[in-house]
Amino acid sequence: MKHLAVVVDWYGPYSSENALLAARYDYKSGLYIGIGKRRYQHGLPVPQYVGLSINLGARLSQHHKLPEITRDAKIWLGEVATAEIAGPKRKSTPESLDVAEWLHAYFLRLPLNERKTLSPPQRAATILNRWWRTDYETLWVKRPHPLWPDLFDYLGPTLPAKLVWFGKIQKRVKPPFQTI
């Protein structure tokens, strides 16, 4: 299998109620990640669960894990911004969603994800995360949580993976772009 490259545009943060409304009216399929604290957890809110759905509104309305995030709960909704893989489909879930969810769950060791934290996916993939405000136009300058990397570069189960947090050596170039 060829290496899969996926860009995920994340929008948020939403409260649980606002995430449900946004998912019903603005999204069809996509990812979601819950950040917050579970009962008896102390300290800063942390990423707890990542999921996918081909019908986000229906999924968020009757979710089994997100209600366990009881304090400081914020939901981020993600859309795949790259083209889906051409050819026959092996399952109903788009592979880009499946691999993006799996890499997040596996490498972030999200405590409420049980299945996809046990083994890495067989498919090599690079996932680039971008974060947007709920107006769908304004880019967040900082990532929503320090544990959530900008990039997952996973070359397969037998090779090392890279989780990348873009940092100090970064140049922002504002439009209009001019070359000298």
Image (cartoon, grey):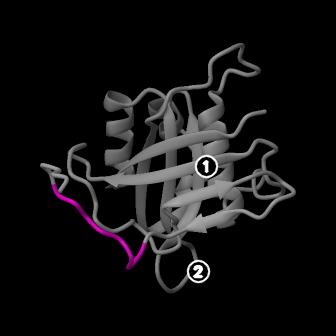
Under mark 2, the amino acid is Tyr
Q: Earlier in the sequence, mark 2 or mark 1?
A: 2
Q: Residue 111: x, y in percent? A: 68, 66
Which residue position holds label 1? 126
Report the span colored magenta: 167-174
Instruction: Quarter of the image for the C terminus: give it.
Output: bottom left
Q: Secondary structure at mark 1?
A: strand
Residue 60 horizontal side relative to residue 88, left or right: left
The residue lying at 67 percent from left, 53 percent from top is 103
Residue 98 horizontal side relative to residue 122, left or right: left
Which residue position holds label 2? 40
State the predominant SS element of the stretch in magenta. Answer: loop
Is residue 110 visible in the rendered structure shown here? no
Q: Residue 160: x, y in percent? A: 77, 64
Q: Residue 134: x, y in percent? A: 26, 48
Considering depth in this image, is 25 or 163 the residue closer to the camera?
163
Residue 164 painted magenta: no
The image quadrant that residue 136 belongs to is top left
Residue 169 painted magenta: yes
